[in-house]
Image (spheres, grey):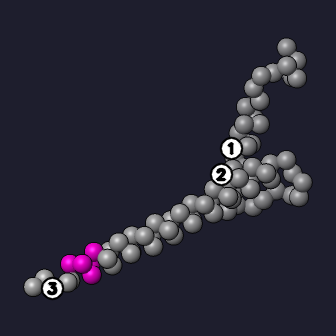
């Protein structure tokens, strides 16, 4: 079986892709312009950005819930 007939990529290729995604998630350095792993680094960076946006939304929603609950409990009932 030749290299072109392989159904799955080489282990080194898989590890390089996973490493590039992880490096992007952690905000590590991007490769030189035009490097084939940069698109995977960008995927990792997008995942990081998405997680930051989601975390910010969760914090805001939690604070609003706590404020609403606090206001409700502080209301005097006749």
In terms of sequence position, does the residue under pointer 2 or pointer 3 come before the other? Answer: 2
Instruction: List the residue tagged with mark 1.
Output: 18
Does the stretch in magenta take in 9?
Answer: no
Query: Dot 2: within a 10 Å radius of its alpha carbon, few (fewer than 14), some, or many (20 or more) residues?
Result: some
Identify the magenta region.
Answer: 69-73
Residue sitting nearer the eye, 78 or 45: 78
Q: Position of residue 63 (x, y in %)?
A: 39, 75
Q: Position of residue 44 (x, y in %)?
A: 68, 54
Secondary structure, mark 1, is helix
For the point 75% across and 26% down, the residue is 8
- Using the image, determine if residue 1 lies above or below residue 70: above
Give the numbered dot on residue 64. Answer: none
Instruction: List the residue tagged with mark 3.
Output: 76
- Going by the picture, which residue comes out furthest to the front? 78
Secondary structure, mark 2, is helix
Instruction: Mark yes or no: residue 60 visible.
Output: yes
Instruction: List the residue tagged with mark 2.
Output: 22
- Using the image, determine if residue 66 lies above or below residue 3: below
The C terminus: image quadrant? bottom left
């Amino acid at each position: 079986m030749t290299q072109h007939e392989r159904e799955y990529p080489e282990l080194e290729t898989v590890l390089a892709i996973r490493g590039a995604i992880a490096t992007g998630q952690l905000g590590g350095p991007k490769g030189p312009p035009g490097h084939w792993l940069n698109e995977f680094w960008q995927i990792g960076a997008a995942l990081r950005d998405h997680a930051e946006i989601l975390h910010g939304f969760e914090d805001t929603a939690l604070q609003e819930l706590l404020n609403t609950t606090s206001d409700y409990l502080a209301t005097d009932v006749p």
